[in-house]
Image (cartoon, grey):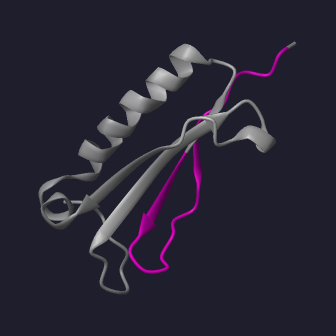
Amino acid sequence: MITKPIEGTFTRLVVRVNGGPNEDAMDSFPVPFTFEGFALEGLTDQDIDDMVQVVVDRIIADHPDYTVYVTRSWSGIRNEPQQTVYAPLPSE
């Protein structure tokens, strides 16, 4: 089961994967996943993480110099903090 926020009734989750070369262009690869109804009851956090990882791996493969992040937004106004899931090593 997907971990939901403790307070409130949430019926929809949108997970967004994105990335870019710098702060000004951090929306170079917007990929949203929307989960409702059955998905919220039938999928697990690991299932969602696995789907997101496919997109993250693709962005990194094409652009290893991009920073990639993920945000989760629940129906209503509940947003979880943005997570950086990949950052390139600093150049020397």
Q: Give the image quarter of residue 63.
A: top right
Dividing the image into 4 quarters, which one contains the C terminus?
top right
Callout count = 0
On screen, residue 16 versus residue 38, left or right, reads right
Residue drawn at x 43%, y 80% is: 76
Task: Assess whether residue 72 is covered by the magenta stretch.
Answer: yes
Against 22, is 42 above or below? below
Residue 9: percent from the left, percent from the top? 30, 84
* In this rendering, position of residue 47 left or right of residue 92: left
Look at the image and say whether residue 56 sits in the magenta stretch.
no
Q: Residue at x 31, y 36 (%)?
A: 50
Position in image of residue 24 (x %, y %): 80, 43
Is residue 70 shown above or below 52?
A: below
**Which residue is pictured at 69% across the width and 41% down the height?**
26
| Residue 61 in view here | yes
- Where are the magenta residues, as a range? 70-91
Residue placed farthest to the bottom in the image?
8
x, y (%) of residue 6? 36, 80
- Foreground: 92 or 31? 31
Q: Position of residue 70 (x, y in %)?
A: 52, 47
The residue sitting at 55% across, 21% down in the picture is 60
Q: Mark yes or no: residue 68 visible.
A: no
The picture quadrant where one finds residue 87 is top right
- The quarter of the displayed image where residue 85 is located: top right
Q: Please identify the quadrant where the N terminus is shown.
A: bottom left
Reply above or below: 92 against 4.
Answer: above
Q: Nearer the viewer, residue 52 or 20?
A: 20
Instruction: Return the residue nearer the eye: 84 or 74.
Output: 74
